[in-house]
Image (tube, rainbow, N blue to C red):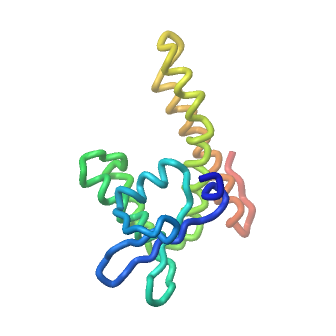
Amino acid sequence: MTEQATQEIIIKKYANRRLYDTDRSAYVTLDDLAELVKRDITFVVQDAKTGEDLTRQILTQIIFEQESKGYNLLPVNFLRQVISFYGHNVSAVLPPYLEQMMQHFVENQDQVKGMMGNMTEFSPLKQFEEMGRKNMEMLEQTMNIFNPFGTNKK
């Protein structure tokens, strides 16, 4: 499995909606692919006939399945806001911004877990305020990149 950390596994999606893991030579389910994601194993889903990359659609389908099972990780207002950005002029900026936010969250996850372990020092409101402040700074920096007039409000 050490090779899988550096190589992408190819998953073929057939017309009958079945998913085939070419690495293991076996059919897999969305739950199996969710486990690969959790284990940080990279895969690409391709249409078996055309070779079209279907990875984004399958990952979205995995999220849908997880939400349907009651995990409810994505708040309704967040989902509404994401939907409202489709076709909007900010849609080019949103994906890299969300990736940066998620990367920042992942990098700080150990720090947050450490604070949770010591509840006497932990203030959830203070931590979320700090994360929100940092996220707003990142958004402002990102928006400044796309601002042709270079006006900064501080």
Residue found farthest to the left:
69
Residue found farthest to the top:
120
Instruction: Please give the name of the residue rendered at 67% of the width and 50% of the height, measured from the top-left corner.
Output: 153
Spot occupied by residue 12 in the image (x, y as percentages of width and height):
45, 76
Residue found farthest to the bottom:
50
Vertical position of residue 133 compared to residue 139: above or below: above
Relative horizontal placement of residue 80, taking residue 116 as reference (left or right): left
Spot occupied by residue 106 in the image (x, y as percentages of width and height):
57, 42
Vertical position of residue 141 compared to residue 71: above or below: below
Instruction: Please give the name of the residue rendered at 50% of the width and 17% of the height, measured from the top-left corner.
Output: 117
Relative horizontal placement of residue 117, taking residue 152 as reference (left or right): left
Image quadrant in which you'd find residue 13: bottom left
Instruction: Please give the name of the residue rendered at 53% of the width and 73% of the height, measured from the top-left corner.
Output: 89
Instruction: Please give the name of the residue rendered at 53% of the width and 64% of the height, measured from the top-left corner.
Output: 43
Image quadrant in which you'd find residue 147: bottom right
Spot occupied by residue 98 in the image (x, y as percentages of width and height):
54, 55
Spot occupied by residue 10 in the image (x, y as percentages of width and height):
53, 71
Q: Nearer the viewer, residue 59 or 3?
A: 3
Vertical position of residue 140 compared to residue 43: above or below: above
Q: Nearer the viewer, residue 70 or 17?
A: 17
Count of numbered badges drawn on the protein: 0
Q: Quadrant of the C terminus?
A: top right
Residue found farthest to the right:
150
